[in-house]
Image (cartoon, coloured by chain):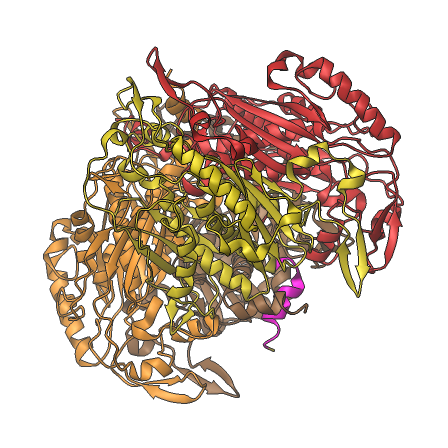
Chain colours: A orange, B brown, C red, D yellow
Amino acid sequence: MTGSIYGNSFTITTWGESHGAAIGVVIDGCPAGLPLTEDHIQTFLNRRKPGQSKYTTARQESDRAEILSGVFEGRTTGTPISLMVRNMDQRSRDYGQIKDCFRPGHADYTFHEKYGFRDYRGGGRTSGRETIGRVAAGAVASLLLENLGIHITAYTKSIGSIVIPNESYRYEEIYENPLYMPNNAYARDAALYLEECIKSQDSSGGVIECIIEGMPAGVGEPVFRKLDACLAQAVMSVGAVKGVEIGDGFQVSRAKGSTNNDPFYEENGQILKRSNHSGGTLGGLSDGGRVVLRAAVKPTPSISAEQETVDIHGQNTHIAITGRHDPVIVPRAVVVVESMAALTVADLLMDNMSAKIEYLQKIYLKKN
Amino acid sequence: MTGSIYGNSFTITTWGESHGAAIGVVIDGCPAGLPLTEDHIQTFLNRRKPGQSKYTTARQESDRAEILSGVFEGRTTGTPISLMVRNMDQRSRDYGQIKDCFRPGHADYTFHEKYGFRDYRGGGRTSGRETIGRVAAGAVASLLLENLGIHITAYTKSIGSIVIPNESYRYEEIYENPLYMPNNAYARDAALYLEECIKSQDSSGGVIECIIEGMPAGVGEPVFRKLDACLAQAVMSVGAVKGVEIGDGFQVSRAKGSTNNDPFYEENGQILKRSNHSGGTLGGLSDGGRVVLRAAVKPTPSISAEQETVDIHGQNTHIAITGRHDPVIVPRAVVVVESMAALTVADLLMDNMSAKIEYLQKIYLKKN
Amino acid sequence: MTGSIYGNSFTITTWGESHGAAIGVVIDGCPAGLPLTEDHIQTFLNRRKPGQSKYTTARQESDRAEILSGVFEGRTTGTPISLMVRNMDQRSRDYGQIKDCFRPGHADYTFHEKYGFRDYRGGGRTSGRETIGRVAAGAVASLLLENLGIHITAYTKSIGSIVIPNESYRYEEIYENPLYMPNNAYARDAALYLEECIKSQDSSGGVIECIIEGMPAGVGEPVFRKLDACLAQAVMSVGAVKGVEIGDGFQVSRAKGSTNNDPFYEENGQILKRSNHSGGTLGGLSDGGRVVLRAAVKPTPSISAEQETVDIHGQNTHIAITGRHDPVIVPRAVVVVESMAALTVADLLMDNMSAKIEYLQKIYLKKN
Amino acid sequence: MTGSIYGNSFTITTWGESHGAAIGVVIDGCPAGLPLTEDHIQTFLNRRKPGQSKYTTARQESDRAEILSGVFEGRTTGTPISLMVRNMDQRSRDYGQIKDCFRPGHADYTFHEKYGFRDYRGGGRTSGRETIGRVAAGAVASLLLENLGIHITAYTKSIGSIVIPNESYRYEEIYENPLYMPNNAYARDAALYLEECIKSQDSSGGVIECIIEGMPAGVGEPVFRKLDACLAQAVMSVGAVKGVEIGDGFQVSRAKGSTNNDPFYEENGQILKRSNHSGGTLGGLSDGGRVVLRAAVKPTPSISAEQETVDIHGQNTHIAITGRHDPVIVPRAVVVVESMAALTVADLLMDNMSAKIEYLQKIYLKKN
C-alpha cells in the first residue's frame, strides 16, 4: 500500500533512501501561477540541514534542491512539480553492526518484519533524510499560503526539562540561536544540557510548537478530516513524534467547561474570542483564532552507549551506535513540523473551496 | 469535500444529524464471510448510549441499529454494509437561543462560517450523536480483528485530577462502574468530583486510554500512513479530543535516549522488548508490543452557567445552555475511541497485505 | 476493497441488494445551499422505474426516495446527504435454479469466485436495482450542474440495428416514446423489433448517447483524470455497458488528421470550433464544445430460452430464466448513463477549482 | 487537483514536461522482493521510443531510465520506486507559431484556459513524452504480474482501413514488423497506406488490441471499480484514445442475448466458457477467460498541411506544423496501452486480497 502519498487536493509523494541515488518529492495539485524558485526551496532545506551547530551532526550534506518539472518561466504551471536532492554520501562502506542488528528505538526490526529485508545503509527509507521531500514540498505550500495571507511559524518550546513559558516567548530570537528557541537565554541553558548529554553518550527529547496565523474561519472538513485531526496525522507521521496536542491539549483533561470555553464577542464587525484554549479549532474547523499545536519529540535513538538487542538471525547481542549523532532531534525537526502544517492547511483550503454553491458560482458563472 | 469518509481499504462513510430522520454508516470493504448480527452491533452502541448513569444524560435514546445491506444468511457478503439508527427525538420544538446564538466551545460559529447556515437542532451534524455511525462500524471492525487474534480495550484513565496510576489498573473492573474506569475506588472518587461539577453548573475533562493486544509486527505504512499517525487522526477526529499520544507520549520530551529506547531480546524463538516506552510502534509500524494510546478529552462545552457570546447577526449577547447535559464526555467517548482504533487497525491490516510478493503469491498462485 | 465509492470531491457511496431491506446512497461533498426536494430525486428515479411500458418489466416497484440527512429547511447543508429507497419485494420465495446455478451473462459465477458465496436473491448486489443509488445521487449532481449553467441529456441512439442517424434527431421527442429515442418513428420500428425478441424468448442490445452542454473550457485533470477518462470509467461501470466512445469514437481509427482536427476560429470574442470530431475534449480537458459520448449496452442476459451452464457444485446443467424480463436494458439505462455523467462532471468541476492561484485568492482574499 | 496519480494500492505518480529537465514516475505500493533491473524497464521504454522506423519520428531520444530509489541489492524494498529519464532535447530554440497559436487537435487551447498559461515547448506536459512515466511503471507492473502467472500482450489491430481479422492473427509476428501488427502481410499494406499519408501531409488513426491471459476469476471490485471500468479509464487516459471496448464491444448493440451470452461448462474440474463475447469480465469481475480490450486511436493531430486556428490573443490565423511528425500514433502507443492494462490489473489484484476473511487469516494467523 501507499504510505508515501499525503494530501487530497494538494498531494505530495515522497521517495528516496538515505544512501540511494537521490531523495525527492512530487507535488501534484499546486495551483498554476505561483512564482517559485529553487532558492526559495533551499531556504527551507537549509533549516533542516545537518552541521548547523555542534548539537546537530557534523556530516556535510549539501542538499541542493533541483526543480525538474512543473515550473515554467518562473511560475508553477499547475502540473506536477518534481523536486530532487542528490545524495552525496553514497560510497560503499562498512555498515558494521547496523547491517545485521536491530537498533533499539529504530525501525530496523519493524521494516524487516514487514518487508522481509531492508536497505540498511544509513537507515534507508527510515532515515531522517526522508524528511527532505516533506520540507521541499512544505516550502512550496508555505509560499502558497503566504499568497493567501496565512503564515506559519514553528520553534522549539522545550528541550529536556528546559521549557520556555508562553510569557517568555521572544519570536524575534527564534533564528538567533541554533536550537530555534524563541528565547536566547533558554537556548543557552538548553545548550548546556545537551553538552551533558553528549558527554554521557546520551540524547534528549523536546517539544516543538507551531502556530498558524491568518486562517480564515471554517476551514477543515467535518467528522474525519477535521483540521486538528489532519494536523495530528501530519505531525505524528514525523518519525520521532510521540504526541500531538492542539490548544490547551492534555491540560483540558484537568480543566472545567467554565474556563475552557472561549467566549465570543464582536468588535468592529469582527467576531473574536476572549481566549484561545481551543487552539484555533472548534468542531474541527478553524475558528478564526490562531492555530496552536505542539509535538512531543523523543530523544535520538542512536546513542553511543552500549544497548541490548537481537540480530537479524534472532540471536541476542549488544550494539553501540558509532559515529557522530545529533544529541537531539528537535531543532532540525522544527522546519519539518512547520512543513507538515503548511501542507495540511494548503490541502484543506483547497478542499474547502466547494463548501458552498456560491463559491462554485463565483468561479464558473462569473465568465458570463 | 468529503470529510465523512474514513479509511482506505476498510472504508466507512457516516451520515446523519442529531434531529434528522436517522443516523447511519456505510462500510465498504469489509471482507466476506464474517458472521455478523445486529445484536453484536447493539452491544457497542449500548456503551455510548446516554442515560447509563446520572453522569451521562438522562435523555432516553433507544438507538437500535438496523442492518440494511451487506449481510446474507448471517454472514457479511463483501459488499457494502449499511447500518442505520432512527432518531427518536425529532419532534419540532423550541431551540431557543441555540438557533440564533453561537455556543462557546461548540462548532456553531465555525459551521455557520463554512456553510453559510447550519442545522441548529441539537447541534445537527456536530452533535455527539454523529459518533453512532463510528461505533456501529467500529463494532464490525472489532469483530474482524477478533477473528485475527487482535483485541482492543479502552477505558477512562482520568477525570479531572483523579488519575489512575498504571500500577493500580484492574482491567476486570472497567465494566463494573459507570465511568468505565479500571479501578472502582478511583471511579467512586471521580463520581464525587462530578457531583461537584454538576452542582456548580460546570463540567470536567479527562483522559481515555486504549490498548491493542495481539498486533502482528510490521503493520502500518511508512512515512505518512504510519500506524501511530493514522491512530492520531482517527482519535483526534473525535469531537472533544484535544491531544493524542502513543506510549510515553509527551513524557518523551523530558526523557533520555538511554532510558527511552526499548532493548530487544530473544526468548523461545520470539523477539521481544524489555520495556514498552514506544507504545508498540517503531518507525510507524507495529513492533509486536502492546499498542498504547491516550486521548485528552475536553470538558463538556454545554454548561448551565451564563456565558458571553455573539448571535448569528453579529451582536454581543449571553447564553446559558438549558436542559440536562453530561458533566463529562469521557465515559461515553470510551467506546468511540475504541471504535476508531479498531477501524484504523482493520484498515492498515488490509493495506499491509500487499507488502511482500510472497503474500500475493500465497493468494494467487495457491490455486494451481 | 472499496468498489462502491465514486468521486473525489463530490463523492457517492452506494449500498444495497435487490431483495435486502433497502437500497441507498450517501453523497459526501455536495456544496451547501442547493435547494433540494425528494420530488426532484423522484423525477429521476421514475425514469429508471420498471413497468413503464411492455418493453420494460411489469414488476411493480414503487421506489420512493427518502432524504435521511444533509438537507435542512429545503437546502443542502454541506454535510452527507443520505438517500434511501425501501425494497418492496422482500418476501421469501423460491429462487429455484438461480440459487444453485450460474446464469450465463450474469455475475453469479464471478461473485461466487470472489467472495466464496453470494446473495442470490434477485441478483443481490449485481441486480440492476444497484443503479437506484446512482440515479438518486445523479439527480442531485444534475441539479448542481443546472445551477452552474450545465445541462446533460441522454437518450437511446439505437436498439439492435435500428439506429437513428444524427440528422434525424428530434430531441423534443425523447420523452414522447417509452424507449427514450429522439425520433418517434424510429422508436416505433424499435418497438416492433423488440416484439420479435420477446416472441423468440430473446433480447436486444443498443446504444445510449449522452450530450453535455454549457461546459466551461479547461475542466478535467491532465493525465489520468481526464474528463473523457473519468466519463469512460463512470459509464463502463454501469453493468451492461461493453464500450464507451467520445466524439467520433471508433470512427477515428479510419479517419485522417486533416479531417479529424477541429479548426478553431474567433467570433464575437469567443473561441469556437468549426466541427466537433473531438466530442468536446482536447487533451482530456473540456474544449468548450458540446461533450458527446456513447455507450454500447449488451442484450439482457436473462432470457427464457434454455442455456447450458454449471451449478455451484461444478456440475454441468441447463437453465431457463423464468419470470418476466426486459427484452432490452437500454431505455431504463438512459437515466443511469446521464446520472453517471452528471456525477463525473460535478466532481471534476470541484477538482478544477484549485487550478489557478487566482481562484484561491478570489475565495480567500475577498473577505479583506 | 491531482490528475497525475493513478491507482489505489499499486499507485503511480507521473511528472515531467517534454522539454523540461527530465520526465519520471514514482511507484508507491510495489510489493517487496520483486527482482528489478534498469534493463527490464529499458526493454519497455524502447518499444515506445521514436526513430524505430520511418513511420515514427526520426528524432533521437535516448530515453535511458534510471532507478533512483526503492530497489536494494536487485530487489524492490516495498518503498517508493523513483524512475527518471533525463530529457536530451532541452536546448532553447524557436518554437515559432506553437508558442502563440493553439494547434487544432492538441491541448494547447484547453491548457491555456485551465491554467492561464502553458509550457509550450514541445507540448510541455501534454506531449506524448508524458507516457514515458506510464511505460516505465508499466514495466514494473508487468513484471509483478508475470510473477503471478498473468501475461499481457498488446498489438496494432488496424491502421486506417487496414484491419486484421481475428482469424488472421499471428501473434509471433508482432515484433517482426515496425507497426507491431500480428500479421506481417497486413503490416506491409498498412506501411504503404502510411506512405500515402506522409506524401499528402496527413496522418492516420488505428485500433490497438490488448489481451490479458492467466487472470484468476473474481478480480475487480463491484459497482464503480469494475475491472472493465478501471481498464476503460486507464486506456482512455492515453492522450489520443477516443474509444474503449471490452470483448464484443460496440457489436453487442446489434447482438441478441441468445448469442451474446457465453455458456459455462465444466471440464476436468475447471469451469470454462464456450465462447468469450464478454471479453473476460462478468459483472465487472474477471470471469477466468481471456480479457480482451480495444482502443480507438485518433490520427496524429500534428500535420504539415495548413490549418485554420486562433492565437493566444484570440485572433484568427493559420498554422502548419513544421518538422517531422509520426504519420500515425498507434505503433508507439501499443506499449502504453499494455502498460496501463498492467498497472490496472496489478492494482486490482492487490485490492482483491481483502475480499474474504480467509485471505486475511491466511496471512495473519499463519504465523501461529
Q: Position of residue A350 (x, y in %)?
A: 37, 37
Q: Is residue A183 magenta?
A: no
In-image side of D126 versus B147 (left or right): left
Q: Residue at x 55, y 55 (%)?
A: D173
Q: Nearer the viewer, residue B72 or B121?
A: B72
Q: Position of residue C49 (x, y in %)?
A: 74, 27
Q: Residue at x 58, y 55 (%)?
A: D171
In-image side of C97 versus C267 (left or right): right
A18 vs B19: above or below: below
Looking at the rendering, the stretch of residues picked out in magenta corresponds to D354-367
Q: Position of residue A26 (x, y in %)?
A: 33, 51
Q: Which quarter shows the C terminus of chain D?
A: bottom right
Q: Report the number of discs.
A: 0
Q: Which quarter shows the N terminus of chain D?
A: top left
Q: Quadrant of residue C124?
A: top right
Q: Residue at x 32, y 78 (%)?
A: B259
- The reply to whether residue A348 is in sight is yes
B18 vs B134: above or below: above
D11 vs B293: above or below: above
Q: Nearer the viewer, residue A108 or C280?
A: C280
Q: Quadrant of residue A117?
A: bottom left
Q: Position of residue A157 (x, y in %)?
A: 23, 58
For the stretch drawn in magenta, the main secondary structure is helix
